[in-house]
Amino acid sequence: MPVKRFRFVWTEHAEDRLSERGLTRTAIEQAIREGHWIREANDGAADWRVATAKFVVVYDHSEVADTNTVCVVSVWAKRRKHLTKYK
């Protein structure tokens, strides 16, 4: 699928999460552009979810009203899996 051009609107919560989690707007917006066609429905406050190897982003996007606008609701870094040997 082609990468769609979106206009991004960020909630205050999502912007706060960027700095708290060491993520960038560029990375989040690119993930939405590239992953929008394979997005999953989200059960929480936002309608859609896109996950990458490093983070998850949830967002709203209307398929009817304004099809070019995405509202980023929240983002978080995935936890790193620690390899621990138990004896």
Image (spheres, helix red, strand yellow):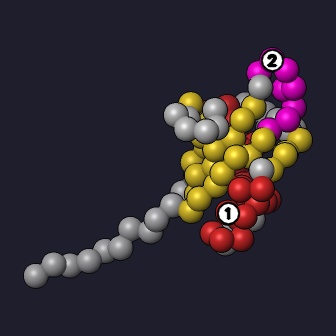
Q: Residue at x 56, y 62 (%)?
A: 77
**Left or right: 17, with 4 as reference point:** left
On the image, the x and y values in percent for residue 35 come to 66, 40
Identify the image quadrant of the C terminus.
bottom left
On the image, the x and y values in percent for residue 76 come to 59, 59
Q: Which residue is mark 1?
A: 17
How far separated are the C-alphas under marks 1 and 2?
A: 28 Å
Amino acid found under the numbered disc labelled 2: Val
Disc 1 residue crowd, few under 14, some 14–19, many 20+, Cα 10 Å: some
* Label 1: element kind: helix
On the image, the x and y values in percent for residue 15 come to 76, 60
Amino acid found under the numbered disc labelled 1: Arg
**Left or right: 70, with 19 as reference point:** right
Residue 68 circle label: none
Q: How many marks?
A: 2
Please determine whether, in this image, residue 42 is positioned above or below residue 31: above
Please say if the residues under marks 1 and 2 sit with CB atoms less than 8 Å apart: no
Q: Which residue is mark 2?
A: 64
* Label 2: element kind: loop
Q: Residue at x 71, y 55 (%)?
A: 14
Which segment did they paint magenta? 63-70
Residue 39 seen in the figure = no
**Quarter of the image holding residue 13?**
bottom right
